[in-house]
Image (cartoon, rainbow, N blue to C red):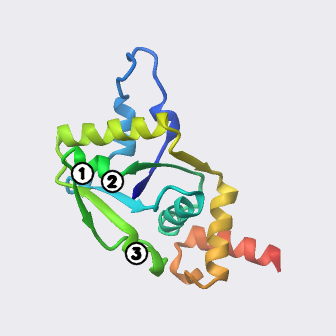
Amino acid sequence: MFLARKVTLSKWEPKQGLSLGEISADALTSDLRTKSNSLSFWQCGVGKRADVEEAILAMAAARDHVDKFDVVWVDDDELLTDGQTLNNTKGRTPVQGLVDLHVDVCRLDYVRLGRVAHRVVSAIEEERFFRLRKSGVKALLVKAVRQERVMLSDLKKNVQAEVQKSLDAAG
């Protein structure tokens, strides 16, 4: 099974002044910012587009704004091989059907976080990443509202406004 996480792909590109294999501190401090020594991920099955889009929906529905998503997915078996601790936790998303797909990589320290970073780099090198433009993210949210997977009122104000605008435009 794969676990998806939102990243900024440009931060993971090779940087001038860093040798091959060195990871930018900006990538770590931006995309792998921990809370209580944990990182949040979402299960995305075997990494098929539909499964990755479900993970994006879970994350996007909880955001303050509709924006593009760069997502990378890592193999949970590889994380376990690295000595990581995975903990299934209730995800913070208004899409109730996706709440149970959340996983925390926990008990992180400097060394373990570095291992996660290397798994992210490997995933990118193996083309296990995906960018969904803002219009695609909005379309996922609109579809979820239409299918009553999430209530419009459960989305944050700015997201509600953008989704409502799309719903109104469609008639």
Q: In the rendered image, which quarter is residue 104 located in? A: bottom left
Disc 1 element: helix
Give the amino acid type for the residue marked by disc 3 in the picture: Val
Which quadrant does the C terminus fall into?
Answer: bottom right
- Rounded to the nearest whole Å, what is the CA distance between mark 1 and mark 2? 6 Å
Q: Is 143 or 115 nearer to us in this picture?
A: 115
Where is residue 24? Give x, y as percent. 37, 28
Residue shown at the point (53%, 59%) measured from the top left: 52
Q: Residue at x 52, y 45 (%)?
A: 129
Circle 3 sits in a helix, a strand or a loop, which is it? Answer: helix
Which residue lies under the disc numbered 1? 80
Residue behind mark 2: 76
Could you tell which of marks 2 and 3 lies nearer the N-terminus?
2
Q: Mark 1: few, some, or many residues within 10 Å (few <14, many ≥20)?
A: few
Horizontal side, residue 31 vs residue 79: left or right = right
First in residue order: circle 3 vs circle 1: 1
Q: Say how many tags the image has.
A: 3
Instruction: Pinpoint residue 2: horizontal percent, then vertical percent.
Output: 41, 55
Instruction: Look at 18% across and 47% down and name the residue there.
Output: 83
Query: Which residue has dot 3 on it?
Result: 99
Q: Position of residue 1 (x, y in %)?
A: 39, 58
- Between the C-alphas of marks 3 and 1, the distance is 22 Å
Mark 3 vs mark 1, foreground winner is 1
